[in-house]
Image: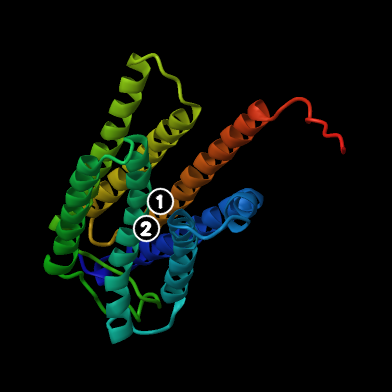
Amino acid sequence: MDPGDSPFLFTTSLTNTRYSTFAALSFLLYDYLLTFDVEKRLVWNNPWSFGKILFIFNRYFGSLALTFNSVMLLTSLPNDSQLCKGFRMWEGLAVMIAVMSTEVILMTRIYAVYDRNKLILFVMAVLFAANIASTALIIYVGPPGGALSLSVYISGCHVVDRGFSYFLCWLPAFGFETTLVTIMLYRGLRTRERGLNSPLLNVVIRDSIIYFLVIFTALSVNCLIWGMSPQTFNVELSGCWTIAASCAFGSRLLLNIRERYYKEQSFIAVETKPLFKRETTSV
């Protein structure tokens, strides 16, 4: 459907995309405010490590990406300009990076709860590489996104249509996320069967399930919008929420694990501390 056939519906869908992006950015910034004190105590006051670098990247990539997207959606550049064409390629890449950074967090937690099992790490690494390759193949080798001249109707860089097959790019993430949560649940069930109870493992499993449900919902909405909506319904509407959800819940996963870990370490230190100091007498 050409925008000229229904300019009101077309401009409304693009305006809704702007509102959706601003709302996703506001949600992410609000989540930062809620957890900044915990972040300062558990992350910034501790030495540098791979986990700290991973947290900082996951924590701040989403806000920077959504801020940039908001600016590009408000720009007065023609939609068929080279910069807008590059921006449309960037949007798909930004969603991939946000989702996959959280997947790396989950992979490191799974590797830890499986006692650093090299076979588990190898299997996850192979599946992760296949996930990246198949998603990139669908996004960048598949049918290019439509870029109609929108200057008459609305300013800003927008994706009009990626083609019906483009919704398939979310399916590899579906499969990989399901595999990760299944591996984590299996570990939890095996631990309970042995009569063991690990509060830290319980936190990891709980947050992994919550993240899976959130990202499953976000990916499902993306598939529905990109696969079933008419061309006038802008496909950018839900991608911003995938970025926000991945970064927010990925960061909370790391914060919750660190908080539980430090609590256990403090408890162990108190339990092993002698009740009375040994008195020494000088001769």
Q: Can residue 171 be seen in this view?
A: no
Task: Please tell me whether residue 225 is drawn above or below residue 90 in the rendered image.
Answer: above
At label 2, the amino acid type is Ala
Q: Are marks 1 and 2 in contact (CB under 8 Å)?
A: yes
Residue shown at the point (52%, 55%) measured from the top left: 28
**SS under mark 2:** helix
Whether residue 62 sits left or right of residue 182 in the image: it is: right
Q: How crowded is mark 1: few (under 14 residues within 10 Å), some or many (20 or more)?
A: many
Percent across and percent down for residue 102 are 37, 51
Residue at mark 1: 246
Residue 98 shows which numbered tag? 2
Q: Establish if 24 lies above or below 73.
A: above
Residue type at tag 1: Ser
The residue lying at 43 percent from left, 67 percent from top is 65
Q: How crowded is mark 2: few (under 14 residues within 10 Å), some or many (20 or more)?
A: many
Q: Where is residue 206 in the image (x, y as percent from the top left)?
A: 43, 31
Eyeballing the image, is 150 above or below 38?
below
Is 156 on the left-hand or right-hand side of 251?
Answer: left
Q: Kindly tell me whether residue 197 is visible in this rendering.
A: yes
Q: How is the image coloured?
A: rainbow
